[in-house]
Image (cartoon, rainbow, N blue to C red):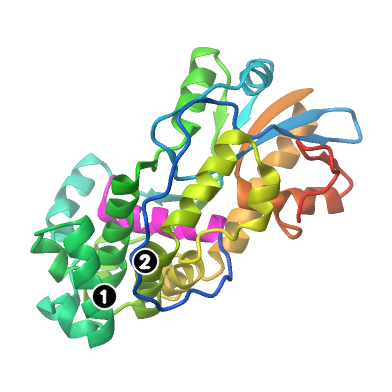
Amino acid sequence: MRTILLSLLMLLATAAAGRQATPVPAASVTTLAPVLVRGEQPGPGLWKVSSPQGHVMWVLGTLEPLPRDMQWQSREVLDRLRGAQELLREPGIHLKSNLGFFGKLALLPRLIGIRNNPDHARLAEVVPAASYARWLALKARYIGRDGKVEKWRPLFAGFRLYQAAMDRAGLDRKGVVPGLLDAARQAGIPRTSTAYVATIEDPRALVKDFKRERLDDLTCFDAMLAQVEVDLTQMGQRANAWASGDLATLRRLPGDAARAPCADALSGAGFARKLGLQDVEGKMRQAWLAAARKALAAHASSFALLPIDQALRHDGYLAALAAEGYVVESPDDTGETAP
């Protein structure tokens, strides 16, 4: 089901996978566009995870967004990937439904307007006046005239602004993962999903309930405004650091500050509770770690993708593997998985 509800869960997965607790200032400043690297860049090196049996998993820490005009070239990554017997994809959420093709087709009309506020409310009616004034200034700069977005829920409107600002700054939201998945496909390497699977028993009822539900997403909306106002340059610095393989800078700079309040808003919603996603961060973590253990047991060499924040954090996914007895070596040979 390629629907807006799937997009909502993708937002939840993205927020949870790289969740940070960094406080976001409520400011209204004009941020200069970040100066981004161009041309061929090596990206970060690979983490090496070794099992007691001598099997190895090579892990690439991924990041989004990245500089649009960068051409990523890493012989080490491609060589390790081509020598792997399996590629583990990034953490995520996968929706499973028993609806057949015609059932999904019948569901489509119900999805019309799913992004909109309940009771046809406009954005100006559901967000505080100060936040709306900030929104209008940023919308004029990055989105322009778009009447439809004024009907959207704050979370969707904020994410639309966030995307538009990144595009204007020259940041690419696709990252390097699509190219790596294509390289693995061409090499005949199995590409294994590590997503937590959530089953939708009644998609029609879920959509109906979601349309009526008011999300507690005002904090998320303000966080996204601040992300565009204050942290656009820092996003560019993180993108440059990833492109050049500068792990010290990535350890120093906090991640996406808007993620924590947005993850809270989504995981606390009724649709998320019905899908059992109250602790989506923990469930995604468990699913990825289970897939990693399985791959390390089955293959002499495997390859995995993981958001770089989770590779660097002292309580991240790789730190969890280290605590279980696997040997984890970082690309800069510090022997650490966190700052």
Q: Please, what secondary structure does the residue beneath circle 1 have? A: helix
- Left or right: where 29 falls relative to 307: left
Which residue was labeled with disc 1? 134
Going from N to C along the chain, the mark reached first, 2 or 1, is 1
Question: Viewer-proximal residue, 314 or 187?
Answer: 314
The image shows residue 263 at horizontal and vertical percentages of 47, 67
Residue 303 picture location, percent across and down = 66, 29
Mark 2, residue position: 229
Labels 2 & 1 near each other (Cβ < 8 A): yes
Left or right position of 289 against 134: right
Q: Residue at x 58, y 55 (%)?
A: 284
Q: Is residue 317 left or right of residue 183?
A: right
Principal SS element in the magenta part?
Answer: helix
Looking at the rendered structure, the secondary structure element under dot 2 is helix
Total labels: the figure holds 2
* Above-or-below relation of 225 to 54: below
Height in image: 234 above or below 120? Answer: above
| Residue 191 placement: quadrant | top right
Q: Dot 2, crowdedness within 10 Å: few (<14), some or many (≥20)?
A: many
Q: Name the kind of residue labelled 2 in the image.
A: Glu
The magenta stretch spans which residues?
1-18
Residue depicted at 56% across the width and 56% down the height: 18
Instruction: Report whether residue 216 is seen.
Output: no
* Residue type, label 1: Arg
Magenta stretch containing residue 3, yes or no?
yes
- Where does the image place residue 194, in percent across and percent down from the top left? 57, 43
Quarter in which the C terminus is drawn: bottom right
Asked whether residue 245 is in view, the answer is yes
Work out how far the residue at label 2 is from the one at label 1, CA to CA, in angstroms: 9 Å
Instruction: Name the residue at 55% across, 55% down.
Output: 17
Residue 100 in magenta stretch: no
| Residue found 22% across the figure and 47% down from its top | 104
